[in-house]
Amino acid sequence: MTLNKDNDYWRNKLSEESYRVTRESGTESPFTGKYWDFDESGIYNCICCNTQLFESDTKFDAGCGWPSFFIPMEESSIEEVDDTSHGMSRTEVKCKNCDAHLGHVFNDGPEPTGLRYCINSASIDFDKK
């Protein structure tokens, strides 16, 4: 079930950058987000609704400047959507609970999945184990 809130709710809840990324499908600049070079143990949650998305032990350094993971905690917590914006063909990753834009998934990640979930730091929050 998707959490439905209006734009005013999200503007009041989120920082300007998190709003731009999650509600307007923005992308933060590479190597600028607080989690791209972060290696503590814990859980990464959706910044909008606190849904658990990724575990720290699935995070890896992809060299791209964004936090990257090879698998979500639960397939049911994310939604993958075709994205043909900006003249590209990609797969967008969204929070299934609140429809927040998280980032994109690519087929150039490590084993065991071969996937790279490239996630904006502005779309996630971290709970330390």
Image (cartoon, grey):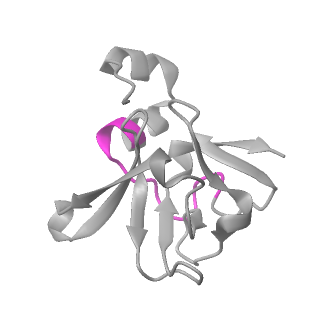
Answer above or below: position of 110 versus 101. Answer: below
Q: Residue at x 42, y 56 (%)?
A: 103
Q: Quadrant of residue 60?
A: bottom right
Q: Out of 117 and 26, give the one closest to the viewer.
A: 117
- Residue 123 magenta: no
Q: Which percent across, then down, holds residue 78?
A: 44, 49
Answer above or below: position of 108 versus 84. Answer: below
Q: Which percent across, then down, holds residue 28?
A: 45, 53
Q: Which residues are magenta?
A: 22-35
Q: Quadrant of residue 67?
A: bottom right
Answer above or below: position of 64 versus 81. Answer: below
Q: Residue at x 31, y 18 (%)?
A: 6
Dominant SS in magenta? loop
Which of the image's four quarters has the N terminus?
top left
Say how many tags the image has.
0
Answer above or below: position of 111 versus 71. Answer: below
Q: Residue at x 58, y 78 (%)?
A: 63
In the image, is 91 to the left or to the right of 87?
Answer: right
Q: Out of 113 and 9, give the one closest to the viewer.
A: 113
Q: Which percent across, then down, holds residue 19?
A: 42, 33
Q: Residue at x 40, y 16 (%)?
A: 9
- Residue 24 magenta: yes
Q: Which percent across, then down, holds residue 11?
A: 41, 22
| View extreme (right): residue | 129
